[in-house]
Amino acid sequence: MSDELGTAIVTGAAKGIGRGIVERLVGEGYHVVALDRLDAVHDVADGLRAAGGNIESAIIDIRDREAIAALMDKYAPIDVIINNAAITDTHPFEELTEDDFREAFDINTVGTFVVAQEGARRMRNGGRIVNLASRSFAGAPNMGHYVASKTAVVGLTRAMAIDLSPRDIRINAIAPGVVDTDMLHYMSDEMQQKMLSLQLLGRIGQPEDIARAVSFLCSPDNRYITGHVLVVDGGRSLGQGQLPPEESPYA
Ligand SMILES: NC(=O)c1ccc[n+]([C@@H]2O[C@H](COP(=O)([O-])OP(=O)(O)OC[C@H]3O[C@@H](n4cnc5c(N)ncnc54)[C@H](O)[C@@H]3O)[C@@H](O)[C@H]2O)c1
């Protein structure tokens, strides 16, 4: 099974959605290389390896092109890349600094580009890349830097899908809604409750919800979907979108 599915590189794998993705792909039989700038990525890999998983880990910053290239050389040929690592925080637009803006782009967009490019250069024809965007590309308050960086990831996904199509490499993005990770936990309890009230399906997403969608798009069985942005938000974007049915003015 592992030979068939090949090697999958997953960034931002120390926690949250990245950890969920790694757990899923290891369970499916991929050879997974889990990357993060946090030491905790080794604990994630050690745990899964002890349970029989085919996984290795490395501490790496996705902005470090030289280190990324050396890692890709080590594991080439690559079959799957999951660009998941990113940062977020909130700043009202008037207070957003250029440093905030540049840092979001440097990690979320340029880091994604670097990993995708160095990986694509060492990828088998027929490989798959999944980029984690965000449903916030449709707009979100106090996150101009993050929203812009993730909208750029959507554009990059479409452009890559065109440029790599001659090699039959399929590139897609996933746009999660609110998911229960540290990215959510920086919010106050009151804000978290508010977010919950906005979810059409009545619950906040879990990392496994996103990992399932990643697994679908990065599977070798995905032969004909490329340049797509799959919104995985429990239906929050539907209809009037932001209100549960009982509060709807149309009820
Ligand atoms: N949680 C949500 O509600 C949500 C919603 C929409 C999109 N997303 C996207 O999903 C992805 C995962 O988010 P999460 O909630 O699990 O976040 P998280 O903060 O829990 O985990 C992100 C991981 O990326 C790593 N990372 C950050 N910068 C890095 C760098 N320069 N080099 C290497 N590793 C780095 C962090 O160390 C961390 O382990 C992100 O792309 C995020 O933008 C999350």
Image (spheres, grey):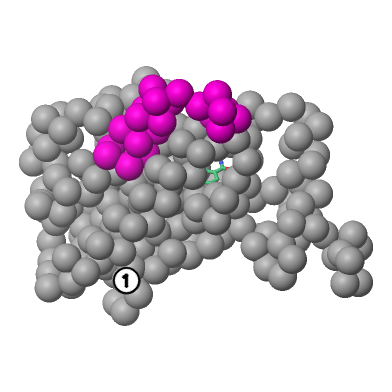
Q: Is residue 102 magenta?
A: yes
The part of the image, by quadrant, that contains residue 92 is top right
Q: Main secondary structure of the magenta part?
A: helix
Identify the residue shown where x is 38% and y is 56%: 154
| Residue 206 placement (x, y as % from top left) | 61, 48
In the rendered structure, which amino acid carries the disc numbered 1?
A: Thr
| Residue 118 placement (x, y as % from top left) | 14, 45
| Residue 5 placement (x, y as % from top left) | 27, 61
The part of the image, by quadrant, that contains residue 11 is top left
Identify the residue shown where x is 11% and y is 30%: 66
- The answer to whether residue 93 is above or below residue 99 is below
Q: Is residue 109 magenta?
A: yes
- The answer to whether residue 148 is above or below residue 96 is below
What is the magenta range? 89-111
Q: Taking the image as drawn, is residue 105 in sight?
A: yes
**Residue that lies at the very extreme toward the front in this rendered image:** 94
Q: Which residue is mark 1?
A: 226
